[in-house]
Amino acid sequence: MAKKRPRLKNGTNPKAKPKSEVTLPATTWDQGPDTPLQRSLKITEDVGRINPATGKMENPNEVRRTRRLSVAEYYQRNGILSQREAEAARKLLNAWERNQRRPPAIKEINVDSSPKPDHFIAVTIDRISAYRAIAKHVPRKYQAYVMQVGRDNHYLEAMPGFRDAYFDRLKIGLEQLADNLGI
């Protein structure tokens, strides 16, 4: 009489070996989701301190972090933009993102004895003014290219009718912006 095999769900072979061993990353620190969309413009870098005696970066616990690059930083790393041009784009992006913030949520919940939210209005006006102070220096001729990368943080290739000449226009516009900002 033949020996009965154990019945497994979906016809799985009881003697089958796993197709691949699970390998853990070099570090056990959480790096967040790992999907193609989440990986775009994301870099992983060591977190440490510089030893004053040797001048080298030390990371004894092998801590790593991920951060997202702006499109201008990405273009700079690929040699499309210079350091100065990327710095001008970064200033524009930071001013725009500061402009988009709202008051802290806890302040919206708390009951204030004063009916006038003067402080929050003043902060909002200051943010708008800081953005306008930078945005007014963007050359009008190259404004579409500079705003696409600098303010909106979108790839230049996403512009309608993209051509390689757009990169030259972006570089000229960011150079003029850097000149006007005194970078």
Image (spheres, grey):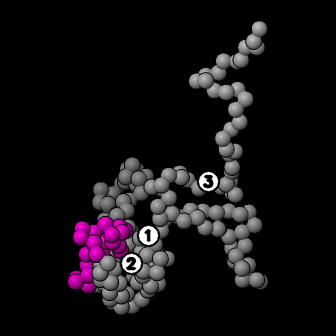
The disc placed on residue 70 is 1
Q: Number of marks in the image?
A: 3
Segment tinted magenta in the rendering: 139-163
Quadrant into which the N terminus falls = top right
Amino acid on which the number 1 mark rests in the picture: Ser
The residue nearer to you, when weighing 67 against 43, is 43
In 3D space, how far apart are the residues under numbered discs 3 and 2 (Cα atoms)? 30 Å
Which residue is located at x 69 percent, y 57 percent? 27
Instruction: Answer left or right for 88 relative to 11.
Output: left
Q: Looking at the picture, how far across and down is residue 86, in whole percent?
A: 43, 80
Quarter of the image holding residue 170? bottom left
Disc 2 is placed on an element classified as: helix
As drawn, which residue projects farthest toward the top?
1
Quadrant into which the C terminus falls = bottom left
Badge 3 or badge 2: first in the primary sequence: 3
Disc 1 is placed on an element classified as: loop
Q: Which residue is mark 2?
A: 89
Density class for disc 2 (Cα within 10 Å; few <14, some 14-19, many ≥20) is many
Residue 170 in view, yes or no = no
Q: Are marks 1 and 2 in contact (CB under 8 Å)?
A: yes
Badge 1 or badge 3: first in the primary sequence: 3
The residue nearer to you, when weighing 137 against 16, is 16
Instruction: Answer left or right for 44 relative to 81.
Output: right
In 3D space, how far apart are the residues under numbered discs 1 and 3 (Cα atoms)? 22 Å
Amino acid on which the number 3 mark rests in the picture: Asp
Q: Is residue 178 above or below residue 32?
A: below
Amino acid on which the number 2 mark rests in the picture: Ala
Q: Are marks 3 and 2 in contact (CB under 8 Å)?
A: no
The disc placed on residue 84 is none
Disc 3 is placed on an element classified as: loop
Which residue is located at x 32 percent, y 87 percent? 172
The residue nearer to you, when weighing 110 against 169, is 169
